[in-house]
Image: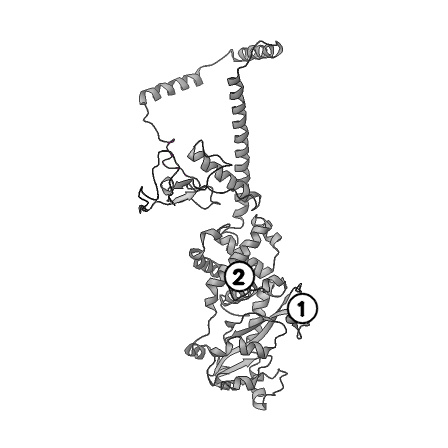
Amino acid sequence: MVNSCCVNNCRNRSHDRRGKRIENGVRYFRFPTWKQHFGTQISELTKLRRMEWVAAVRRKNIIFDSISRHMFVCSRHFHKGKPAYEMMETDPDWAPSLHLGHTEIKQTNPARSARRNKREQLKKNTPHPADDQMMTHQAKESDQLHTEEGTHNFTQEDAGTQTECALCMHKCVEINSLLDENRQSGCDLCLMSDGFFGGDDDQVQYYTGLPNLGTFTALLHFLVPLIPDQMKILIPFQMLLLTIMRLRLDLPAQHLAHHFHVSPTTANSTFKETVAFLYTNLKRSIVWPDRDTLCKIMPSQFVESFGRRVAVIIDCFEILTGKPSNLNSHGKFFSRYTHDQTIKYLIGITLKGSVCFISNGWSGYRNDKHITQNSGLLDNLLPGDIVLDSRGFDKKNVGKLCTEVRLPALTNDSCQPTAKDVEQTSKMANHIPVEGAIKNVCQQYKILTGTIPIDMALTCKGENVTFLDKIVTVCCALTNQCQTVA
C-alpha cells in the first residue's frame, strides 16, 4: 500500500511510481483517534489532540468527524521525527508543527514595520477626552436602530459572518475549558508520577513490598525499554505502580481507577497487560542455582548436619478461588486441606530464602505427591541431593532417583524420622527459611491471600499457563528483588 503525506506542499510518498519502496527514512503516521471510552480525562485530551492535528494540517477535506484511514502525516513535520506520547501535551511533537505549508513566514518590510509601531505608540499616548460622549452617542444610535423597524436590513452575507463568528467563539470557549481541565488533570497525574514516593522508603515498602526506592527505580529502568508502544496508555511509572499496588494491597479496579484518574476498564486492562509483560520479562529471575552457588550459599548449620548436599526446601501453598459455574468442576478444585475451592502451587526455596522454583497451578484436589512428581521439580535434582520439606515428602518415590530426603520433626508423615534427624532438625528449626519465605510471598502480596475469580484459573489463549500462574510468578519474582526474606 502506498502511503503519502496529506500536508499541503509535502510530496513525500512511501513508494515511487513503479511501486518500489522509497528507502529515505521517512515514516508515516495516522491521525490520532478520539478515545471516548477511556475515562473523562483521556477522552477530552485525545479529542483535543485530534482537533490540534486537524487544525495543523488545515485541509478542507479533513474534518474532525471524518478522517480517512489513508490520511497520513509524515515524520518531516515533527521535531523528533515522530508524534509524542498522547499524554505529553506540552511536548512540541504532540501535534505536527513543521513545514505545514500555511505557516511559511514571508519576508517582512522593516520600514513598514517601523511605521506601524509608531502609529501604535501614538494611539497609546494620545488622550481621548470625548470617548464617553462618543460611547453614549453610539449607544443611543444602537437603540434607535433596534426600535425603528426596517431601518437596516442585514444581508445574508452579514448574517453568515455573525453565525460563523458565534461558532468560532463557541469553539474557543470549549477549547479553553478543555485546556483548563487538562491542566488540572495534569496536576492530579503528577501525584502519581515519579515523585509519588517523595524519597520515602517506607512508602515504597507499603505500596509495592519492595525494600526501597532504589530497588523500585532499578526495576523500572530495566523494564522501560522493553515496554511496547501499544501498552502505553499510562506512563511506565504509573503502569508499574498500578500493577504492583494491586498485587500488594489487593485493591479493586474501581479504587485504582480513582487514584490514577482513568476508567475502571482501563485500570483493569492495564493490570492484565502489565502482569503479562512482567511475567514474560521477570520469570527468568526465578532460576535453579548451579551446584557451586548452592555450596556457597549454604549456612554452616546445614553443612555440619547434612554436608553440602541440601539442594532446596519445598512446600505447597493454596489460593482460594471462586466457585465454578459448572457443578461438575466443583470437585476438581475442592481441597481436603482447606475444605474449599483452591488452586495449589509447589514452591522451592534456596537456603538463603530466594524463590528458585514455582510450579504452574494445580487443582485443589491434587495431593502434594502428585504435584511433586509432575511439576518438573524432580528434573532439577541430582542423585544424592537432599530435599527438605516442612509438610512431608514421599521418600519411596524420590528414592527411585537416588535422592535422599530429610523430614523436619514437625511432620505428620507416616515415615517417622530417626532420633538423629529429630535432634538435627530441632537445632536448625530457627534456620529453615521456607515458612518465612512462603509467608513472605503470600503476605507481601495480598492478592494471593484473597479469593481469586475463577476465570483467572483458565488457560490463557495460545499459552499453557493461566493468568493466575502469571500473577504468582510475578509475585515470586518481585520477592526475589528484596535483599532478604523476613
Please tell me whether residue 323 is drawn above or below residue 66 in the rendered image: below
Observer-nearest of 302 and 164: 164
Q: Kindly identify the residue that appears in the image at 45 percent across and 37 percent down.
A: 53
- Residue 135, image x, y percentages: 55, 13
Looking at the image, how many numbered discs can be counted on the residues? 2
Residue range in magenta is 96-103
Callout 2: few (<14), some (14-19), or many (20+) C-alpha neighbours within 10 Å?
Answer: few
Q: Which residue position holds label 1?
A: 328
Observer-nearest of 187 and 35: 35
- Residue 121, image x, y percentages: 41, 19
Q: Which residue position holds label 2?
A: 461
- Residue 368, image x, y percentages: 59, 77
Ranked by sequence position, the earlier of labels 2 and 1 is 1
Observer-nearest of 166 and 4: 4
Q: Quadrant of residue 429?
A: bottom right
Residue 306 appears in the figure: yes
Please tell me whether residue 194 is drawn above or below residue 137 in the rendered image: below
Observer-nearest of 404 and 157: 157
Callout 1: few (<14), some (14-19), or many (20+) C-alpha neighbours within 10 Å?
Answer: few
Amino acid type, label 1? Asn
Q: How is the image coloured?
A: one colour
Give the residue furthest to the front. Answer: 18
Please tell me whether residue 94 is drawn above or below residue 216 in the rendered image: above
Q: Is residue 288 magenta?
A: no
| Dominant SS in magenta | loop
Quadrant, the C terminus: bottom right
